[in-house]
Amino acid sequence: MTRYIRRAACFCALLLVALLVNATRVQVFEARSYDDNPANRRSSIARYSQPRGNILVGGRAVTGSQDSDGRLRYERTYRKGPLYAPVTGFASQLYGTTFLEHTEDGILSGADPMLSAFPLWNDFTRSRSPGGNVVTTLDADAQEAAYAGLAGRKGAVAAVEPSSGRILALVSSPSYDPGVLSGNGAVAKRSWVGLNEDPDRPMLNRAIRQTYPPGSTFKVVTAAAALDAGVVTDVDEPTDSPDPYTLPGTRTSLVNAATGCEDASVRAAFEWSCNTVFARLGVRVGVADMAATAAGFGFNDQGLGIPFSVAESTFDVSVDKAQLALSSIGQYNTRATPLQMAMVSAAVANGGQLRAPYLVERTTRSSGTTVATSGTRPVRQAMHPSTAVRLKELMEGVVREGTGTNAAIPGATVGGKTGTAQHGVGNSGTPYAWFISWAQGERDLEPKVAVAVVVEDAEADRGEISGGGDAAPIARAVMEAVLRS
């Protein structure tokens, strides 16, 4: 009898060991697969069981959380949602997250182990820390000035601090309220369909995810390449440029919207945006040097993140001389985001050094203690310092007496460059109006802000002056806001 009891006990022990092994397999080794299973609602319930951390601008939260009394308890709310949508993105219980809500989700949701003093304990108890906060680099006044300046027109504004790379404004228009997507009910579903079917594409972040032909604003890059390569040694010497200019190897004539471009100096051609002079300069510089200078400014960089990804700005390196001529005036296949063109202006303002742009200053726990900071940002030399000095002079001339006088700010030093980008079949579309600039207050030791503005549906003549008429006043308002602060 004792033998049978012993056998039964051993069998029960084996069953217990098997049960423990299987429980360990399920709870430890296969826990992630069960957590990620769409049929498992426990992770979603846990995720929305507490308020989400906030995104801060100028020390104030532009996001919040509200109790919905549902199973997915807390829904995301937004203060001035359309104004900050290109930065915050949305956090939806149905459609996931975008932009800062996505890249900083671990901090905001409380899942990041750095938020806990005892991260291993959280893993053991399957609990979450309170959501942390994300402190942005944005200047609230500059953001509002950019949004008000676009006034609902299609376009975008990007502003950065040249010496650091801090993004001070990032606006896309038309915009939308991300709060309408936060829940999981019929309202969120209808809003999602409506936003995606809207022909104006309000959820498109035009500041970082849309590339445009930069038009004459790209002449800053061409001028830098010509000066660095020694093709131009004196910006006041005549350039022996014809008007019109026949593109190499073709019978196509390139003309100017401005007058007085024949044999114009680089200074005069820059101030009045002579296409013929800069197209010919690009050909003289050559593809290799033009491409190298463009790359120094950030073109053809596929890895730019701020922290969310930015569309690649491109300068085509597989071009013949005629195509190179057009590329050198910001046409053909040359494409740029507004953020990229703000980087071009910032490099000029910062003595030729380009600081990588960034949007998150630091992340904190709910108590306010810092979790992580942006740290040291990489820097690249976009051009020789002497070239940057001459380009600053040229850009100042554009604002003082050229096509960018609408950007002038009393008591401040302002440099700029207008641009009009042709597009559409046979260039039949309304030109995009561009303006890039930088500004330095009279008490500042260095330029404080660099701005790029693009207006898609500009109401102006089809000439270079439209960038000064439509986009320059917006840039001026943004620069004034930064200088005041």
Image (spheres, rainbow, N blue to C red):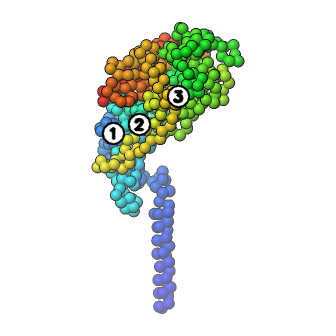
Whole-angstrom CA distance, mark 3 to mark 1, is: 29 Å
Q: Earlier in the sequence, mark 1 or mark 2?
A: 1
Where does residue 192 sit, x and y in percent of width and height?
44, 34
**Residue visible at 57% across and 13% down?**
238
Give the residue furthest to the right: 249
User: Is residue 244 shown to the viewer in this render?
Assistant: yes
Contact flag, marks 3 and 2 (Cβ < 8 Å) = no
The residue carrying mark 2 is: 164
Q: Earlier in the sequence, mark 3 or mark 1?
A: 1
Of residues 379 and 157, the one drawn nearer to the viewer in this rendering: 379
The residue carrying mark 3 is: 336
Where does residue 220 sit, x and y in percent of width and height?
51, 24
Q: Residues within 10 Å of mark 3 (few under 14, many from 20)?
A: many
Where does residue 302 sit, x and y in percent of width and height?
55, 38
Q: Is residue 4 left or right of residue 369?
A: right
Whole-angstrom CA distance, mark 1 to mark 2, is: 19 Å
Type of amino acid under label 3: Ala
Type of amino acid under label 1: Leu
Of residues 148 and 376, the one drawn nearer to the viewer in this rendering: 376
The quarter of the displayed image where residue 274 is located:
top right
Callout 1: SS: strand
In the displayed structure, 240 sits above or below 456; it is above
Give the residue furthest to the top: 259
In the displayed structure, 429 sits above or below 59; it is above
The residue carrying mark 1 is: 56
In the displayed structure, 308 sits above or below 257; it is below
Q: Residues within 10 Å of mark 2 (few under 14, many from 20)?
A: some
**Residue visible at 56% across and 22% down?**
233
**Residue visible at 58% across and 11% down?**
263
Q: Earlier in the sequence, mark 3 or mark 2?
A: 2
Work out which quarter of the rendered image holds the C terminus and state it: top left
